[in-house]
Image (cartoon, coloured by chain):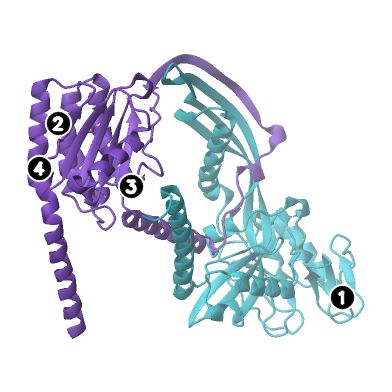
Chain colours: A cyan, B purple
Amino acid sequence: MVIQYKCPDCGADMAFNAKSGTLSCESCGKTLPVIEYNEPTDETVEDFESFETQTSAGTFGEGEATQYQCNNCGAVLITDKDTTATTCSFCGAAMILGDRLSGQMAPAKVIPFSINKEDAVQAFRKWCKNGLLTPKGFATAERIKNVTGIYVPFWLYDLNGQGEAHADCTHVHTYEANDYIYTETKHYDVYRKVDLNYNKVPVDASEKMDDTLMDKLEPFHYDNLKDFNTPYLAGYLAEKYNYTDAELFPRVKDRINGYVGDYIRSTIHGYSSTFIRNEWTDVKQRNASYTLLPIWMICYDYKDSEHIFAMNGQTGKIVGKPPLSKGKIAAWIAGISGSVFLILEILTIISQGGLL
Amino acid sequence: MNRWIHKLTGVLFLAFLFLCISAPKVAYASEVTHVTDDASIFTDTEKEDLEEQCNQFYESNNVNVVILTTNSIDVTRKEYMEAYYNSMDTVLSDAVILLINMDPNDRGVELQGYESCEYTLSDDRAEAVLDAIYPYLKDGAYFDSITEFLQEVDYYVNLEPTTTYQHTEQDNQDYNEDYYADSQSSDSETSFAAKSLRNLAIAVVMAVVIVFIMAYNSGGRMTANQSVYLDASHSRILGQYDHYIRTTTTRVPKPKPQNNSGGGFGGGGVSSGGHSHSGAGRSF
């Protein structure tokens, strides 16, 4: 059930090209649009068909010991149980494990990579150099250990959020009359009821990925969201989800409850003070689609410890904890406090009309 | 090492000389008329009482307190007092002068400190003294205002001068708790060094907070907010009202503009006779 894409011209392995958004052959340079890829070799026809059968039969079982063989060199593929796309460790051919992408496990959507490996490395180097607090040795970014393009499983939730809130608001107005300063406070009873829809809120469904890291990678642009098709995975790693949409719903619900509250507060404006007396919000799931999102994982060695960074494979946004230089932190604190102190001193002298 | 001892002896010798010269000066001082009540706002017994209090004040502090009251003057209060001091400088020496002018066109009080009192009763402190006696003057309790005045001045002349003393803020706070509820003066009393210390503290706290935020955000920030995922075309406000309940109104008296006719920044200055002094004044 291994899917491999062979070049119809020269027979070499094809991989997905992030720049052109097509399948391309490294040997002869042939490119094929992903959608129009309908000239599969004999082998892949078989594989695609079995992909389809598996969908209906749904024979895939969790932790099932399936052995995959490379169609090129016959080597046994070494994968862990979550991998859905990888490359053969012997001949380097791009492999897609069709049965792990079928049935319940079939992704609905995918955002293909738009940043290729070279650009990712270059962008990361630039990011390291721009780090204001990172140590000097780190800033040169010479120790990139490995860069891996992974399609990480996400659930994209379409959600309905409802909320109601009662608030005490005041409007304060001051004016002067007859040697007195009057403060007039008008009190209002304010009520809001909202019905909101949120589309495609992503939640990382892989247990290997750090949730906060993945959240920071947002936003992804959905104009490039495609229906899932296996050729997008050729040449990259891909994982399948570990948590179902129902299991992850509490996490997205927390987040959207906060959003609904934010929205309600944003509709109450024009007041001097707002005190929310009581607030009720509820979030319901309309739909969730299993989606693979492109992420570059960058492994970096610095002073014997490994730092892991993630890059949004679509927008190039980089997240991850870089090492911090104590010297630079001290220099920044000294610099800022020095200049603030100087400004305050000058202001003090001016306000006092000179030194005593 | 020897040089320092020489210098120290020199300074001590000079100080001794100075004491010898100034001693005869203060000998006259007890003959000073401390209370000159041209406006007749004190009764005779009050006047005697005040004169006695001022004498006692001089004995314990070596500072002449002069109380002047006038019905009308041709010059400003400040100039009037400077002229007074010029004419009396040999006998007054370290002096605090308080002028109460009852002229309806220029009803006000003015305070000046000369010689050592220029520093022990700096402009800021003079303002604080006026803050304390102002309510009495406003109510026409002139005798009480002078009694209060003597207490205040007694406190300040025994403090270190503001120019070198750095702990006035705490002292004043302690004092304020005892003597008056109005703590406004403690702020204006803060010496430059104390303000610098405060500025330094603010600067360091700001820098630490800024750098902490920088460090916190060095790993990337969460930039997606609710508007990114909100489907605005399918989102509605189902209900809303803003009901007016009531209006409450409070009022406070307008702060009185302070009339600093003492001149310069905060009331100090140099008289035409060449005597520099501190001071503060305001109308009542």
Disc 2 packing (10 Å; few <14; some 14–19; many ≥20): some
Which numbered marker is on residue B273?
A: 3
Q: Give the spatial CA distance, label 1 vs label 2.
A: 107 Å
The type of residue carrying mark 1 is Cys
Q: Residue at x 53, y 62 (%)?
A: A210
Determine contact: label 1, label 3, CB under 8 Å: no
Q: Which residue is mark 2?
A: B147
Drawn side of residue A284 relative to residue B89, left or right? right
Name the front one of labels 1 and 3. Answer: 3
Under tag 3, what secondary structure? loop
Name the front one of labels 3 and 2. Answer: 3
Which numbered marker is on residue B30?
A: 4
The disc, 4 or 3, on the residue closer to the chain's N-terminal end is 4
Q: Quadrant of the C terminus of chain A?
A: bottom left
Q: Give the spatial CA distance, label 3 vs label 2.
A: 30 Å
In this view of the protein, which residue sits in the foreground, A161 or A71? A161
Residue A326 spot, x, y in % from top left? 44, 73
Whether discs 3 and 2 lie on one chain: the answer is: yes
Question: In terms of image quadrants, where is residue A86?
Answer: bottom right
Q: Residue at x 31, y 49 (%)?
A: B275
Q: Which residue is mark 1?
A: A7
Q: Residue at x 38, y 36 (%)?
A: B260
The type of residue carrying mark 2 is Thr
Q: Give the spatial CA distance, label 1 vs label 3.
A: 107 Å
Q: Is residue B182 above or below residue A184?
A: below
Question: In terms of image quadrants, where is residue A77?
Answer: bottom right
Drawn side of residue A43 relative to residue B148, left or right? right
